[in-house]
Image: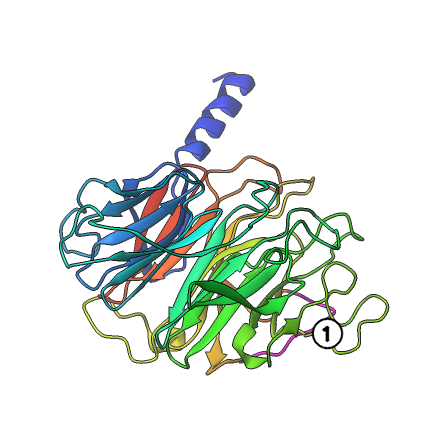
Amino acid sequence: MRPALFASFLVIAFLGATPAVQSGFSIQQIATVDGAREIVAAPNGDLFVGTSGQDVYIIPHADGTAAAGAPRVFAHFDDSPAAGVAFSGNTLYVGTQFAIWRIAYRSGDMQARSMQKLASVRPSGIARDHVTTSVAVVKGVLYASVGSSCNACRPDVDATRATVGRVTGGAYQIIARNIRNAIALTANENTGSVWAGVAGQDELAAGHPYEIFDDITAHAPVADYGWPTCYENHRGTGCGGVTIARVVFPAYATPIGAVFYPQNPGGRYVFPARFRGGAFVTLHGSWHGPPYVAPAVVFVPMRGDSPVTGVDWNDPNKQWTQFVGGYQADGSQQRIGRATGITVGPQSDIFLADDMTGAIYRIRPK
């Protein structure tokens, strides 16, 4: 085979590949949903998929022993992206660009019967830069995160930008501010806390700022994360009192989704004990380079709400290990996908989304 043809063959083979999971696990694509972003499972094993479009999809029987059902639109919004999804009790919560919604759910529903708007966000109506709204629920309290409208600006176009808040009484109440894009918002059901993985700003010195993952609810509101003038371990001027994160990742890794593994899992597909209580975080990878930071799913061992390994401000790679990789070839922009949403199913397996290919994966112990 001629070298040019062989190289083309390798590219085609790479683009058709499946990400590689840690030894002892299997990873299987079960569905395709264009622009898949955050995901969450219902107790009966159906899977909800938020997207970069106007629709939230449902994948029936995603957590069954047989093949999953075909994806179908569960709810349509006159607003996009409908990227954020969370589930609690008998309710699905959805975050769209300008609002947060509640959908009453009965086991087996294949289509939303009604939708209730709970609160507005981005009241300026300006659709710019970070336009996804993530949602999380813990102990009956609904939280959301709203990204900034720019890379590094103050003031922003409205007060909800670059914040995390509680949704209560028809309003979005800010509990953390100056937090650039806290897109990987998740509840730690083991402890009752809410964590956020944050995409940091661009155009700083090479290798900075580290991306952060922190327990928002560990701090008295309103917590100040210092964007855009302070970052990492109080770098910058006038940064006294700025919140310091508990977990860091390399610059431009871009956390998009996160889930805590149950401390006491049950079902057919329980992971080994070393994963219990820890956090899985999806890293979307960098949008610029070279070199390009690779997409991945990483695992952070935890004791309650404390990482087993503390932050090393000289090395953002010490607190985590890679769980899923193989998305990217040799630091280039040649990729087979980009990890987005992640959730634990009712049988204790893990589901993983990819917004580049639309793939929905199911990960189980062998």
Q: Which residue is mark 1?
A: 242
In screen coordinates, is 162 left or right of 166? right
Q: Is residue 364 visible?
A: no
Rendered location of residue 13, percent (x, y): 42, 31
Quadrant containing the C terminus is bottom left
Q: Say which quarter of the image contains residue 198.
A: bottom right
Rendered location of residue 206, percent (x, y): 77, 52
Q: Residue at x 60, y 81 (%)?
A: 220
Q: Residue at x 75, y 78 (%)?
A: 241
Rendered location of residue 321, percent (x, y): 52, 65
In screen coordinates, is 325 left or right of 294? left
Depth check: give the residue in front, 41 or 206.
41
Magenta-tinted stretch: 308-316
Depth check: give the residue in front, 265 or 154.
154
Residue 362 counted in the magenta span: no
Rendered location of residue 22, percent (x, y): 41, 59
Q: Residue at x 66, y 40 (%)?
A: 288
In screen coordinates, is 212 left or right of 55? right
Direction right: furthest residue: 237
Q: Is residue 102 visible?
A: yes
Residue 309 counted in the magenta span: yes
Magenta segment main secondary structure:
loop
